[in-house]
Image (spheres, helix red, strand yellow):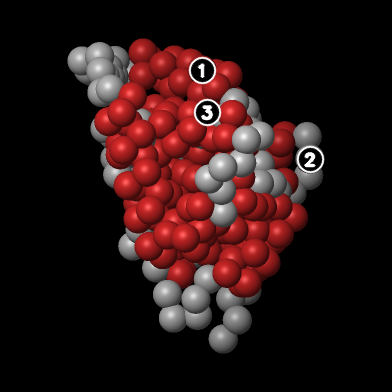
Amino acid sequence: MPVTRSALRKVGKATRERLGQPAAPAGRSVPGYGDWADETIYGGIWSRPGLALQDRMICTLATLGVLQRLDALKSMVGTALDIGVPPRAIVEVFMQPGLYGGFPTTEAAAACASDVFAARSVRVADEPERNDSNEALDARGQELMARMHGERGQQGYAAPGNAVTGALYPSAVRYGYGELWFRPGLGHRQRMLVALASFTVLGLDAQLRKFAQSAVNMGLPRNEIIEAVIQTAPYGGFPRALNALAILSEVLPKDA
């Protein structure tokens, strides 16, 4: 039996309250917006099966951070802490997409998180300086690329011998695959969720096509890959999510 709008709205309100999110503030000036948000955002997206709540939060933080939706991000950081996402994991969600959307996004998102942490007396522990050699980073990056992408890791802008893309791509291998993907705080599976969400909302179709296939190699089932993209829709826009889903429909194995 189809779920009625009233029932979905009720489920959404309960989910929003479970997350500790206030009623949509636009409801003060846009009639009916609060009910509409409960129904579409929290009932229609957050309450979907197929992806754990903390994983949905990771996708949401990545989306809000890379798009610099800072007011919404600050509220979600508090919710992330409330549902058990570790502080270090939160800041790592902001660290990784700096490579995709620009490092100022990391700095601004991390500043938001710092404000929330300070208000709650939460501290992210320092760690020793990371001093792996360039050779070690390059080797680790190449190994991870091969495991993730297989032959696709040598195609397109990653093709060996391309003198133009080769002026930059080795840095992506070294500092992306060799460094970022091995930082503590987030495992490879969670970092893949960050990548999928970020590529979706940034409209980076070539990267999404590549990484969606690689997500299967990293142990994500088909439904979780799809849900990671769907989770971005309320925050990055339904058109971008739908465009991304169209790509997934082309590249994901039906039995993944």
Rendering coords of residue 198 (x, y %): 56, 43
Nearest the eye: 148 or 69: 148
Residue 11 relative to residue 190: left or right: right
Q: Residue at x 25, y 18 (%)?
A: 131
Q: Name the mark on residue 30.
A: 2
Q: Residue furthest bottom?
A: 1
Look at discs 2 and 3 and give the one toward the viewer.
3
Nearest the eye: 241 or 215: 215
Quarter containing the C terminus: bottom left
**Disc 3 marks which amino acid?**
Gly
Element marked by disc 3: helix
Circle 2 crowding by C-alpha within 10 Å: few under 14, some 14–19, many from 20: few
Residue 158 visible to the viewer: no
**Disc 1 marks which amino acid?**
Glu
Rendering coords of residue 179 (x, y %): 35, 31
Q: Residue at x 41, y 16 (%)?
A: 114
Quarter containing the N terminus: bottom right
Residue 80 relative to residue 254: left or right: left
Nearest the eye: 69 or 96: 96
Q: Is there CB contact under 8 Å for labels 3 and 1? A: yes
